[in-house]
Amino acid sequence: QVQLVQSGTEVKKPGASLNVSCKASGYTFTSYGISWVRQAPGQGLEWMGWISAYNGNTNYAQKLQGRVTMTTDTSTSTAYMELRSLRSDDTAVYYCARDGAVAGKAFDYWGQGTLVTVSS
Amino acid sequence: EIVLTQSPGTLSLSPGERATLSCRASQSVSSSYLAWYQQKPGQAPRLLIYDASGRATGIPDRFSGSGSGTDFTLTISRLEPEDFAVYYCHQYGSSPWTFGQGTKVEIK
């Protein structure tokens, strides 16, 4: 069965960097992409960006350009999201979700979420 | 960027009633690439509907999606107790992908 398993809870100080991993299993990793979505406390869903596990192409939300980097390791079927220069408003649950390899598709599988708290 | 506006913000209904949720896009959604998700507290979203009207695997047939262009609807024909949750629409036809702000379906 398809699974996306994310790394655990993080507590960070403002200005620090965050790294979240998302390990995929149960499907051919390089036939899809991964999108990252975050949800601030009590708020809605915000799309952060996408990476193709097929060719490594990326597409980031404009508001995060310059602070976010998404990568994949096809040897371990793992996607990574790095967010730098953290601020208090980056406090959120971060999700990875299976997306298309080239074009967009509905997110049919999601990780369990990673709670990130940014506080001094 | 395509802005998705969901209405109403909150829908108060009783089990057994019909729920109709709306998602309106600021521009036409390419190829009807619109999805609906259900989210319960403390859980990841769950895909219900893809490509505006396709039902995802394992989703009961009381859930249906319709629409095209800029106007989309999610209908729950008869609410079950487990259907009370927040519902989001999502367009993936034009970058950046975007989500609506959500509609909460609560027990009346």
Image (cartoon, helix red, strand yellow):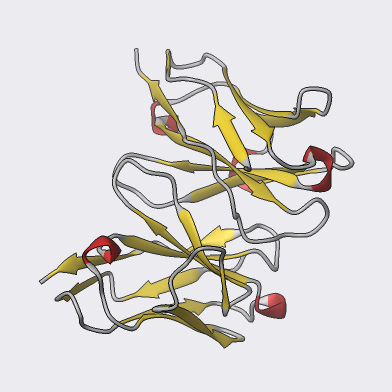
Depth check: give the residue in front, A23 or B62.
Answer: B62
User: Within the image, what quadrant is residue A92 found in?
Assistant: top left
Depth check: give the residue in front, B47 or A49.
Answer: B47
Q: Which residue is pictured at 40% across the width and 30% down the height? A: A91
Q: Is residue B58 left or right of residue B6?
A: right
Depth check: give the residue in front, B87 or A70.
Answer: B87
A50 vs A75: above or below:
below
Q: Is residue A53 visible?
A: no
B53 vs A87: above or below:
below
Name the outermost residue toward the left.
Answer: B108
Q: Is residue A110 left or right of residue A113?
A: right
Which quadrant would the N terminus of chain B be assigned to in this image? bottom right
Q: Is residue A49 left or right of residue A77?
A: left
Question: Which x, y percent locates residue A103?
Answer: 79, 59
Question: Which x, y percent locates residue A77?
Answer: 75, 29
Q: Which residue is pictured at 45% across the width and 25% down the height? A: A87
Q: How many marks?
A: 0
Q: Is residue A7 visible?
A: yes
B85 vs A29: above or below:
below
Q: Which residue is pictured at 55% across the width and 77% down the height? A: B26
Q: Is residue A27 left or right of residue B107?
A: right
Question: Which x, y percent locates residue A1?
Answer: 62, 42
User: Within the image, what quadrant is residue B63 found in?
Assistant: bottom left
